[in-house]
Image (cartoon, coloured by chain):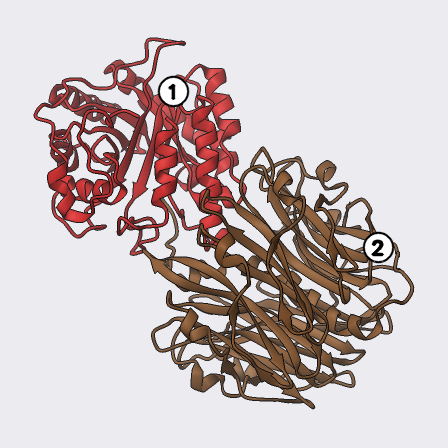
Chain colours: A brown, B red
Amino acid sequence: MRWRPVTMTAAAVLGTALLAGAGTATGTAVAGVAGVAAGAAAQGGTWGTAAEIPGSNRLNHGGQATIGTVSCASATNCGAGGSYTSGFSSTAPIIQAFVVNKTANIWRTAQEVPGTAALNTGGNAKINSVSCPAPGDCSAGGYYTDASSGHQQALVVTESSGTWGNAEEVPGSAALNAGGPGAVILSVSCAAPGDCGAGGYYSDASGHEQALVVTQTNGTWGTAREIPGTGALNAGGSARVDSVSCGAPGYCSAAGQYASKTVDGIATVQAFVANETGGTWGKAEEVPGTAVLNAGGYATVNSVSCASAGNCSAGGSYTTAAPVTQAFVVSETKGTWGQARLVPGSAALNKRGLAQVNSVSCASVGNCSAGGFYLDTSFDTQAFAVSESGGTWGSAEEIPGTAALDSRAPGAMADSVSCGSPGDCSASGSYTDASGAQQAFVADQSAGTWGSAEEVPGTAPLNGGGQAVAQSVSCAPAGLCNAVGQYQNVKLNTQVFAVSQS
Amino acid sequence: MRGLSRREFLGGAAGVAAVAALPASATIPSRHASLPAGRGAAITPVVGATVDLASYAVKNYLDAANIYDGFVGLPLATTIQKVYMGHGEFPPHPVLKMTQLAKAGCEFLVSIEPSRNMVASEQALLAKWLTMMNGSGIPYRVALYSESNDKAFKTAAEWFAYWSYYAPVVKDAGVVCAYDCGCGFKALPRAAAYFPSNPAPDELWMDFYATSFRGGSRLDTLIGLADAAGIPAGIAEWDWSAGDLIFTPMTLPWWNAYCEYIVSLASAGKLPLGAIFFNAIAKGGRADVIDSASDPRIPGIHRVAQAF
């Protein structure tokens, strides 16, 4: 057998939701804005032609760029971030973090995150999440690596009035982060400029991941801390925050997963939620109802979205004793989380025992949409969407048109959903065409009805290497949407693109 | 499943303590895997597990096999294992792994790698080794250059020349000569392109890991090629991770779906040869090692084993 080695740790096993994390940031970022401006005119634009993000190719000397997050305060003003490879050391690629803005309806030039050149001495940095509550005012989070320890360190960076400040290590995270692999911010959500929440994980002295949250108030990041209660839950040695959403300043929710047990390096995983009230984080709790549902020992919350303070929805998956992994949604009303429930209609779609929600976005209280995937009879993944209207979740449906686009394994998947107003959302993701190439898609919902998915216009000629995905979509409140993603060109270099509705 | 009924197996017994529960066969079957009788010949699937010494830090392959079987609760590692001969390695006696395990009735899929220098003397070395093996009484079949489609042969033409040079030697010795391909996400298209035809292989074995399944690898096309060639198919390696970092880390939900996929193939009669679990340390990693009777993968292993 010939392969590369894999070091399987409990922490690594928990890492699956990284693949779904793109939607997390989008949903949360938009939700904070949507809560303020919900109820305006419906969206319904036409997707333009995708283009390489300006300046990204110039930065990306090593040919491996990624982008996983976009957040738009308005249709013409967004922030996004990711990573690029600036070159190679003697042993590994040198990976740098970048941010990019769309202002006045033009995608500007991507830039290395200010300050990371000095911080990222270990040559591995990335922006995982961006949230923009107002044009020119965004916050972002991710990680960098310091050469002295070789560990990842959590970073945050804030844009104010159109200018990105210097990245900083999350205050207090150095004291928490005693081991490898280190600390990472996975999700950022801002309810107002300078008032944000962020979450991720740090590594304790034993190398176990622990759930981390930090709050920004009036532009200043506070001290990171472990989410109360996760230490007690985390008997299996790993916990993390996958998604944060803030309904109002000082009122955020965090969702994630913890290992209740680890055997032979494989974790039994449970889903948790925690609420911040008035700037103080409360105790994490296992998602109500999942203790019964998750007899098979693998539940995660991949995305949470809050329309207002204390009113949120979240989605993920649980595994039955059978074992069958099903998609669930759960809602919080006035600060109290209800019972997790199987996504209506998804069990009938889920023919081969694996479905999950990747992304949730709420335009207003009780009006959300979610997207994810299930396995069809051929063991191919298929993209689904489901919408909540007036507090009632409808039935999940395969995103129209993806069946026609998708031809073979691995299949199609909705990575990200974003709602500009109730019943008006967009979804993005990927599918596999007849040649086996992965292509990027977008699909739009208007007045509660999903339209047909389409290949992201313009990506076909870019994606000569056959590895494209629209990782993240963000719809401005009652406005048009923007999406970002990556593709592989004919030289097999991975590049990043943006596409906008008009 | 072959082997289950011939042992009074104590399912769930763990570790070395379980060794005593696995009575070793007193006799060694005096046969090798003969060339198939032709289309329609009845084939009994064999379900096994390849186990290395390092996984359990023991010095005897039978001890290692019994530890694994004790953890899993099924006599897999004493039923059939894959053996890896080095490049150009044709020792005068069966390797230790085979002699130690054959005493327990184990049979083998032996990957051999005759020299890339395709000269008559190398064919002669191979023929001599086959004669020795046939005389040993150890039941075995040959996989000519396991995972040749991965990186070893840059082109199909290069591989076909190699196959055409050595496969006839194996067949002439009356030994099954199998095509054993890697089925990783990137290797899978080459697995089909490298399917040999001159001469046709006697069997198709596929190395297929859960990470590859998650990445989109499916076996249906290869099985279709085997059907078209009139040969049976089986899985020569299956487990958690082939080290494909793009689609790792693996998770239990994906593991469950992967097992369900293999079950669906077995239940449909598409894997008449059976399947061999791969339990070994690879370059220091224990991702593929079953370390206890409570390993979360074991229920999936049972579902797969019972599907044959």
- Tag 2, which secondary structure? loop
Left or right, A411 with reference to A256: right
- Tag 1, which secondary structure? loop
- Crowding near the residue tagged with mark 1, few <14, some 14–19, many ≥20 C-alpha atoms within 10 Å: many
Disc 1 versus disc 2: distance between alpha carbons?
52 Å
> Is residue A317 in view from this perspective?
yes
Task: Give the residue displayed 72% in from the left and 69% down from the top.
Answer: A55
The residue carrying mark 2 is A47
Give amino acid for label 1: Pro
The residue carrying mark 1 is B201
Label 1: chain letter: B
Left or right, A68 with reference to A47: left
> Is residue A116 in view from this perspective?
no
Residue A371 x %, y %: 68, 53
Task: Give the residue displayed 32% in from the left and 55% down from the top.
Answer: A264
Q: Is residue A114 above or below residue A472?
A: below
Quadrant where the C terminus of chain A sits is bottom right
Residue B57 x %, y %: 17, 52
Give amino acid for label 2: Trp
Q: Please identify the quarter of the rendering in which residue A62 is found.
A: bottom right
Q: Are marks 1 and 2 on the same chain?
A: no
Labels 1, 2: front one = 2
Quadrant where the N terminus of chain A sits is top left
Q: Nearer the viewer, residue B9 or A445?
A: B9
Label 2: chain letter: A
Task: Give the residue displayed 61% in from the left and 42% down from the top.
Answer: A347
Residue A325 x %, y %: 53, 47
Q: Please identify the quarter of the rendering in which residue A431 is found.
A: top right
- Crowding near the residue tagged with mark 2, few <14, some 14–19, many ≥20 C-alpha atoms within 10 Å: many
Residue A355 x %, y %: 58, 47
